[in-house]
Amino acid sequence: MAQSPGNRSERLASWLESRAPLSGVVEFLRHKEVPWHKGTFFYLFGGVALLLFCVQVMTGILLMFYYVPAPEGAYESVLLISAKVPFGWLIRSIHSWSANLMILALFIHMFSVYFMRAYRPPRELVWVTGFVLLVLSMTFGFSGYLLPWTKLSYFATKIGTDVTKVIPVVGEGMRNFLLGASEISGPTLTRFFALHVAILPPIFTIFLGLHLLLIQLLGMSQPLGQQKARGIPFIPNFVLREGIVWVVVLGLLAVLSVYLPWEVGEKADPLASAPAGIRPEWFFTFMSQSLKYIPAKVMGMEGEALGVYAIGAGGLIFFLVPFWDRWSREGRRHWLVTAYGVAVIVFLATMTSLAYFKPY
Ligand code: HEM
């Protein structure tokens, strides 16, 4: 007797279910809701960071086919990618722009969850894993910057790695471990390459997996002071909204990559003196710029070391917010938490803009 199509699809579904019992996941997604309130738009930025991370992985793998991680060949291989390899310039441009957009999306995501107090119990670990992801993303940026072996990347990395010297006891050793030599040279490039393509990706993937898993298990936070906001279905309503934002972000990425292609610059010359106005990537300039305003000695202490400790302490207070903000646990907003968040934003924005518009 001929089987009806309905019968066949049911049998296929039951065959699949017995081998991959995923109906629980499908059921979960069918009933999942996202709280609908005036901050819902900001829930989209975590997804934007996720999209851009996927772009990074795909374009990074393609770049790896041609990149040579040695001082004798790194710059030349980047030139080859940019000038000879079909669409190489585009892939490199997308990789660089997407890295920067990802960090920007991460800052927006982090500050939006901060002001929504989304880190309050039971989401402390979502915040902690997220913060680690931000630090790892910035380390991705730092390690990737040296890879083209250009004048700018060489001296900016030198400034960045020299900062570790001010850390007492372990600073010097840390710097030597990172550099693989007393100065930036061949071993440094090999280590930065290993960090960028082999060490950071699996660590990042583990933390990303944890972050996303916890979000699924705990669900999205309810707005502060409200027991239960009205929800919208995750599928299709929220996913479609996220999809629209992804299309816009991909469009922006394409326009930036095509019309403002990432430049190659001049080859690094370790024997030359540092060119004027050298600065690290924009998301580190808050640190380099603020250190310039601190006198060499403050009350007998090394000014630079004091600045690094102060920035470290400020970052630590911010990182620990789920553990000291007791007010939001009781459903109240406290001015101190808001004021601290605003102070951090003002500090980061002022120092970053000063680095570009009024280099010291
Ligand atoms: C590549 C890095 C990251 C990715 C891909 C990512 C992804 C996501 C996604 C998809 C969500 C759910 C939707 C949303 O709220 O946007 C989320 C929620 C959250 N993220 Fe992240 N995130 C990252 C980094 C961070 C950082 C840097 C922080 C803060 C330090 C953070 C803290 C949180 C918190 C607390 C939530 C829960 C929000 C709520 O329940 O309302 N995440 N993240």
Image: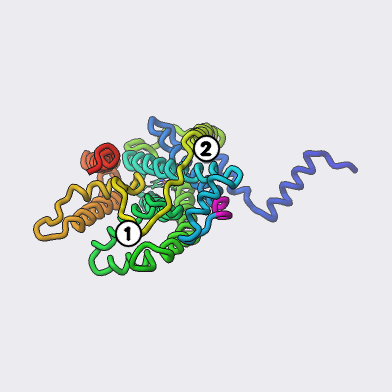
Q: Is residue 276 left or right of residue 23?
A: left
- 113 in relation to 247, above or below: below
Q: Is residue 358 left or right of residue 119?
A: left
Q: Per the image, is 307 magenta?
A: no
Front in this rendered view, residue 291 or 24: 291
Q: Amino acid at mark 1?
A: Thr
The percent position of residue 28, horizontal first and vertical second, equals 55, 45
Ligand number 1: quarter of image: top left
SS at circle 1: helix
The magenta region covers 61-66
Tell me if I can see residue 140 in this picture.
Answer: no
Asked if disc 2 is less than 8 Å from ligand 1, the answer is no
Q: Does the magenta stretch mainly form a helix, a strand or a loop?
A: helix
Residue name at image x 85 percent, y 42 percent = 3
Name the residue that disc number 2 marks: 234
Front in this rendered view, residue 351 or 26: 351
SS at circle 2: helix
Name the residue that disc number 1 marks: 161
Outermost top residue: 38
The percent position of residue 113, horizontal first and vertical second, equals 36, 42
Asked whether the beta carbons under mark 1 and mark 2 sit within 8 Å of each other, the answer is no
For the C terminus, give its image quadrant.
Answer: top left
Asked if disc 1 is less than 8 Å from ligand 1, the answer is no
Q: Residues within 10 Å of mark 2 (few under 14, many from 20)?
A: some
Using the image, tell me which numbered label, if any, was put on residue 313: none
The percent position of residue 99, horizontal first and vertical second, equals 45, 45
Q: Is residue 4 left or right of residue 318?
A: right
Tell me if I can see residue 143 in this picture.
Answer: yes
Q: CA distance from mark 1 to mark 2?
A: 44 Å
